[in-house]
Image (spheres, rainbow, N blue to C red):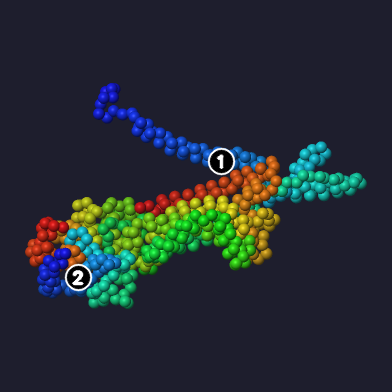
Amino acid sequence: MDSSSTHLFAARPGPARRAESAVAWIFRIATYLILACGLFVFADIIWKGAPTVLRSFALTESFPYVTNTFLFEAPETLHVFTYEGEKRELGDTAYRAFREAEIAKAAAAGQPAPRFTPTSYVYAAGGIWPCIVGTVLLVVGSMFIALSLGVASAIYLSEYARDTAFVRFIRLAILNLAGVPSIVFGLFGFAMFVLFFKWNVSLLAGWFTLAFMVLPVVITASEEALKSVPKGFREGSLALGATKWQTIRKNVLPYALPGILTSSILGIARVAGETAPIMFTAAYVVRDKLPWEVEKVGDFFFQGVMALPYHIYVVSSKIPQNDYTQRVQYGTAFVFLGIVALIAASSIILRNKLRGRYKW
Amino acid sequence: METASSAAPLKRSLAQPPSSSDASGDSTLIDIQNLDFYYGAKQALFDINLRIPDKRVTAFIGPSGCGKSTLLRCLNRMNDLIDGTAVKRGTIKVRGVDIYGRTVDPIELRKRVGMVFQKSNPFPKSIYENITYGLRIQGVNNKTRLDEVVEKSLRGAALWDEVKDRLHESGLGLSGGQQQRLCIARTIAVEPEIILMDEPCSALDPIATAKVEELIHELKKQFTIIIVTHSMQQAARCSDRTAFFYMGKLIEFDETRNIFMNPKNPQTEAYVSGRFG
């Protein structure tokens, strides 16, 4: 081993070398910075939000004997008051029951009715069950619409359409649609579905608005997925006397499905998280009925729902802030993250399963 | 540029095929007359006249871009899939029916005219599903019948003994040569009359090539085979007739023996003796 640096391949330090390693470090630091910011956001939400959920476990009389008041109850106003020198925090329902009981007790004892002067905080008690339900309904419905329309259109564009100027124009328009701000989709949905179709603020209007918002992503990604299926599979199938649709259905679409699902994962995260498109079209600030508590089946589609992102928006910017609302904000954000993670994880698992089945 | 130079020999050679094919007593299955074929504005085939005999192996040879694959893909209208392609003049008749006629359904045509591709393309399904694909899309779902066809086709493609224990494993797990024979088995499963082979051995090693060539010998008892090949040895080994194409024109078509031993056209001679191409 020659330790002196006189041999042919010895390193030659110099400004070029230093610049080389500096560039690598800049890239590395930038990446880690992003990672750190992301982790900070997640950690903050989990740190402040998890206790809200975890402290809300309560026992119930009947099956399943345990519940979580934050996850499975509707939001309520919180009343804080002093009773017999003790600070009490009660949700609206509990507070009314408590007051009735106290008044009755006083009346029975022949005493004057006690006076309560609670400080009230809206949304600070109870939970977010209607928001969870509403968000899940919005996601499922809009993804169903977006996937059926989007995959149909992607199949047309990639398999049937000839490469004409008009088709190229359609593609460009779809790509541009992806860049439109979500509030514009919200206004479009409001004008089109809520007012023009007279659907009012409803699940249906929200579904279509959200679906239109993710359609560009779904179409573009599905088209890519279809294009990545080797041409040989199509030719081989056609050469065996299959029709075009048979070929697509049996020998193209199944192999493109993992890619299409990947795109729908992105879509789900966006649909679940968007506030702007639903604030005019589907979201209620508060609603005391759950979506399935309707008189006619048809009414189901024409009711507004509460939704997690909109709830966060309302609680954190539309009402006076205090420690009680902060608890709800972070709790909701935590649950919301959890739901998105859950949906994404199940899609990824499904995708990997399919991908394992069709490999070439 | 070389139109002028090749026009004269072209006419001379064109006089040959009908007479030679008549002389050997083979019946004509595919009759191509005055075929002009275009990719958009670019003409790819010029005035092709060719009679392909029944139950024989016909080889198309010629340098790259000479139009041999294009002609092959005309025979089952695979070119329909490419935008802007058109047969501008002439006819292709299979058993007397013009396959570019207005009443012809390319789907029905392709059931009768199977194709094996240059790059083996088994579907990412099991071997069994690969073979039964063609029948299933025709609506055959009878298990016994499908089983029969799978065995018969795999035996026909000399693949049965190698894969009979793993019919339900992916076709992509096979070696390159086995994959190509699987594609042949898949093609014969739908019982076509004609099998088109587009350079079926160009991606195979010599041993796998030999197996496919043996297979071609067996298959010609039942099927009419048209094979496009870059390998002149292959054409010489496994075909009965050979057509030599150059720059989109049919230069010479004759008994394979004559093309290689005694070509009439100087261009053919130059090509088969390796002087250009």
Q: Give the residue at x 22% y 61%.
A: B65
Q: Residue furthest front?
A: A15
- As drawn, the label of residue B48 is 2
Tell me which corner region of the image, top left, top right, bottom left or bottom right, holds residue A193: bottom right
Q: Residue at x 32, y 65 (%)?
A: B82
Give the residue displayed 65% in from the left and 50% down from the top.
Answer: A314
Query: For the residues marked 1 and 2, what is the alpha-carbon distance in whole angstroms?
Result: 71 Å
A241 left or right of A124 in image: left
Answer above or below: position of A117 versus B217: above
At label 2, which amino acid type do we have?
A: Ile
Q: Position of residue B269 (x, y in %)?
A: 10, 61
Report the amino acid beneath label 1: Val
Q: Is residue B166 visible?
A: no
What element does badge 2 sit on? Answer: strand
- Other-residue count near label 1 (Cα within 10 Å), few / some / many at <14 / 14–19 / ≥20: few
According to the picture, the residue beneath numbered tag 1 turns out to be A41
Q: Position of residue A268 (x, y in %)?
A: 52, 53
**Label 1 chain ID:** A
